Every structure is written in structure tokens, then in C-alpha cells.
Image (tube, rainbow, N blue to C red):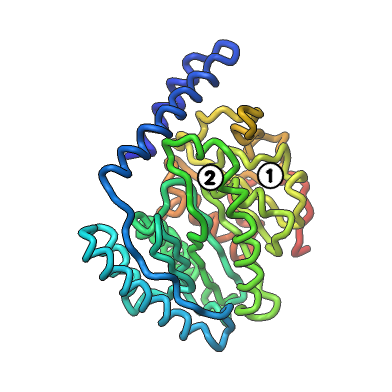
Amino acid sequence: MAEFRFRGLWRRARQTRGGRHWFRALLAVLVTAAVVVPLTAAAARPRIPAPDPADLAPPTAATLERAYAANRANATLASGMAAGHGDRHRAAAERELAAPSHNLLAFDGRGSGRAVEVFGDLAHADRVAVLVPGSDTSLDTFGRFRAGAAALHHRLTGQTGAGPRTAVVAWLGYTTPGTVSATVITPDRAEEAAPDLREFLRELRAVTAPGARFTLLCHSYGTVVCGRAAPHLDVTDLVLLGSPGTGAASAADLRTHARIWAARGADDWVADVPHVSADLFGTTVGFGTDPLSPSFGARVFAAGSGGHSDYFRPGSPSLANIARIVLGETSEVTGARDSGTRDPEA
């Protein structure tokens, strides 16, 4: 629902495009929403009690199963506390995560919540894809996020045959901004999240097989997070999906050796986002150059006719191309425009 409201807000702002009027109109709407929406939500939904996260050392290949079990147990405890508090929706979401089929590498039920789920045999994977979500992703909506990761893993395992072993990681490792809020148009949450993403990927290297190739798949506001973290990430490919901008003027300004890819579905409302950046009230508003712009210099690939939440939809051109990128089958990616960026596998 928030996606449709936000799409309308951007379009109304663009209708007042004379000079800077559209930008002021947008800011007025978002500032109002940032005040009204959180206050209303807080009144309707008090803070949910939750246990502290399980006290675990950084995982290794030998301790993965132990970590999964400990985090499932923590999710079970959190579910019981949420149920006792009367929040049946959160309790159900956490109870689902606590099921034996879920490999939870991390779990934190406090606040909007954080979780990291693994699909596949992480310790023996040759190719690892890490998904970074955008706005409005929390424990309450984690099922939607993990469905995309599961769809990608299903696609990868169906394609590989005797080829490389794969794993997919759904990383909800930061507090995402609300779609209708002032935080969604500033880099503040991304700057807070970037060090955590760098540290997570560093720890993940200690779990996976030597020489495993990593692909970072960043969606919506998650592309801002990845943009902030990019200079310090040891990844082969960085993929920007439905990006409002990264805060960088060009792929080169991300200062990474990874290949930079970008895609946007034909019906993605983020196409209406003004690609500008301005310093207002002591912070930066907006994220600058469109990653699909030739001046940005990313490799642009086909994403089909989908909307903002459709990049991992089974059977979609975007999912097929994402899988090819993860597997290193870059010559098979459709609709790609080679910007001349260095190929780390060459």
C-alpha cells in the first residue's frame, strides 16, 4: 500500500515542475508524512517486547548449524513475547522464521527487527548472492523479502546442474526507512547501515569456500546503502535494482573493482523520482544521478515490464538476468549495455 501512495506523491510533485516548485512540494508532503505517519503508527502500535539477540561469536563453516539453531530459538522466544503483548501479526512472522526449515544466520526481534536468512549450503558455495532490501522492510514484512531470495535460489539451483554451487543470503541488517517519511530521501539510514554491511560481508568470507565469488543485489533504498559501502566491499558484481540513485555521480565514483549493473522495470514508480541532490537543513536530500543514465556508466540490463517489487518474480526477465550475473554468465545477460567497466573475471 505504501508503494502506491508514494508513487502518487512523486507524480504530484513532478506536476509542479516549474523551477524548484516540484522539489519544495515534495519536501512539504514528505515532512508532513514524516510527522503524521509515525505518530499515528506509534499510537496504534506500542513497542513490542523482545529478547536480546543470541550471544554468538562470528560464524564459521563449523558453527553454522549451531548459529542457525540459536537464532531460531531466539525467534521462538520473541514470538512468544509478541503474542503475550497482543501483537499477533509480529508473533506469526517470528514463529514462521523459527521453523526448522529456516536457516537464520542472525535474528533480532527488537524494534522493527533484523534478520539474516540463508538459502543453500553457504559453507560450500562457489557463488554467493546477498540481497539488501529497501524501505519498509522489517520483521513484519520479512516474508515478502525472503520470497525474493527463495525465488532466486530456486532459479539458481535449477540452472546450475553440475556447475557452481550457490547460496543466497537475505540480509535485513539495518533499520530501513519508511516509504512515506523524510528519512527515505536522505542518506542517513544508509550511512548507518554501510559499516554493518561491510562487516557482515567480511564475516561471511570466513564462512564460505576460498575463492567464492560474491554478488551484491541491492533494491530501492538498499542501493543507497550499497553505494555508501561500495569502496570497501570485496564483491565481484554490484547490482542496482529500482534505484533512486546511489549518491554517486557515476559508477567510477563508487570506487569499487566490482562490475556495476543497473535495471529498472517498465512499471517501476521509481522512474518518476527526480534524480537530484541538494543540501538542506544540514543534510543531503536526494541521491543524484540515475544509475540507468549513460553518464553513470553502469551495465544496464533488461528487467521486463514489472513494477518496483517485481525484480525477483519467478519467470521474469529481471530474475533470469540476475541469476546469470550471479553465475558469472555475463555474456548471456539480455539488454546489457557495456559501459567499459573493468571485468574482474577477465
Q: Which residue is tagged 2?
A: 221
Q: Is residue 319 above or below residue 340?
A: below
Tell me the number on the disc at residue 40: none
Taking the image as shown, residue 4 lies to the left or right of residue 128, namely: left
Q: Which residue is tagged 1?
A: 298
Please report the residue visible at 48 percent of the width from the left and 63 percent of the height from the top.
170
**Amino acid beneath label 2:** Tyr
**Amino acid beneath label 1:** Ala
- Counting from the top left corner in percent of width and height, residue 143 is at 35, 60
Please report the residue visible at 55 percent of the width from the left and 63 percent of the height from the top.
130
Taking the image as shown, residue 132 lies to the left or right of residue 94, namely: right
Q: What element carries label 1?
A: loop
Taking the image as shown, residue 279 lies to the left or right of residue 323, namely: right
Quarter in which the N terminus is drawn? top left
- Counting from the top left corner in percent of width and height, residue 259 is at 70, 54
Taking the image as shown, residue 322 lies to the left or right of residue 203, namely: left
- Tell me, yes or no, if residue 66 can be seen here: yes
CA distance separating discs 2 and 1:
17 Å
- Counting from the top left corner in percent of width and height, residue 65 is at 47, 85
- Tell me, yes or no, if residue 88 can be seen here: no
Quadrant of the image occupied by residue 346 = bottom right
Q: Is mark 2 on a helix, strand or loop?
A: loop
Pick whichever of labels 2 and 1 is earlier in the sequence.
2
Please report the residue visible at 66 percent of the width from the left and 29 percent of the height from the top.
279
17 vs 31, nearest the viewer: 31
60 vs 309, nearest the viewer: 60
Quadrant of the image occupied by residue 284 = top right
Please report the residue visible at 22 percent of the width from the left and 65 percent of the height from the top.
83
- Counting from the top left corner in percent of width and height, residue 340 is at 78, 47
Q: Residues within 10 Å of mark 1 (few under 14, many from 20)?
A: many
